[in-house]
Image: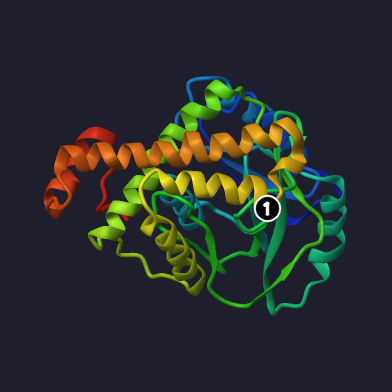
Amino acid sequence: MNQNTQAVDITCIILTYNEELHIARCIKNVQQIARAIFVIDSFSTDNTVEIASLLGAHVVQHKYVNQAQQFQWAIDNLKIDSEWVMRMDADEYLTSALITEIRDKIPALSISICGCYIPRDVIFLGKNIKHGRITPPRILRLWRRGCVYMEQRWMDERLLLIKGDSISLKNRFVDHNLNDLTWWTSKHNYYANREIAVQFANRFNLLSEIKSNDLIYRDSQKGLYYKMPLFLRAFIYFSLRYFLLGGWLDGRPGLIWAILQAYWYRFLIDAKIYEIESHLGKNPSRETVIEYFKEKFSINLMSN
């Protein structure tokens, strides 16, 4: 229990795996507004659990399948008694302006307001990347207990408000990962596998999720992207982000960001799709695809 008299009736949930580089910063930051903090750890092999415990967080270890399942498990099983719940990643923190806004606004909100969308900044190579971003800058991160559901998918999962109205807060939280580019490329190689899993699951109608209007729209936008020619679409993606959306305004970090997002991540996805189709053929059976993803990526396409 946080003894901070300025804490709001909020419980914060943080998912972790080997986050000793970030977890202390995150917990100390969130303690300024949260009454309780739960760290759901996927059996870290570093000092994440020890650091979180020493800082007063409730640490629960649970076997990891993917982000969506892990977070939904937390929502369903943690003994949360606060009125509000917040999601934070270990490499994120709240700005001082957002902390003040939460303290001032949340206790006074109408009972009809069940969710708060919060804008996000991304710091990359020491630079706040303000341009060239396609994903929505506002994300549902704070909600009344019992009012959300986590979309069950392998990639780009989001919290869905299932009742009540929402508001958008003015001030920002920050995604600032302190790892190096070797870590970044390794992580996005893993993300590429998850992205491909979603695309093949969609192709074979393997996703059993109930889709919100927002998810239908997002899938339709990605569908347009994946209808473009293989490999050429990564070039179009880079041109859109760097030139049309102003990524060049963020200097060298903006250039590196745009190239990595397009020619490392998106091009890598296409290369992996090409590899899979070369191995399985253009029209593999449903069963062949399911078995391939289990064997190569340890991904069960039927699990979502």
Q: Position of residue 127 (x, y in %)?
A: 76, 34
Q: Quadrant of the N terminus?
A: top right
Q: Position of residue 256 (x, y in %)?
A: 63, 32
Q: In the rendered view, does 54 fall on the left or right side of 96?
A: left
Residue type at tag 1 = Leu
Please state which of residues 6 and 149 is positioned toward the viewer in this rendering.
Answer: 149
Q: Position of residue 40 (x, y in %)?
A: 52, 40
Q: What residue is rendered at 41% in x and 70% in y?
A: 211
Q: In the rendered view, does 22 fall on the left or right side of 209?
A: right
Q: What residue is rendered at 81% in x and 58% in y?
A: 102
Asked if residue 6 can be seen in this view, the reply is no
Q: Position of residue 223 (x, y in %)?
A: 40, 62
Q: Is residue 28 above or below residue 225?
A: above
Under circle 1, the secondary element is loop
Quarter of the figure with residue 108: bottom right
- Which residue was labeled with disc 1? 245
Please state which of residues 110 and 217 is positioned toward the viewer in this rendering.
Answer: 217
Q: Is residue 1 above or below residue 85?
A: above
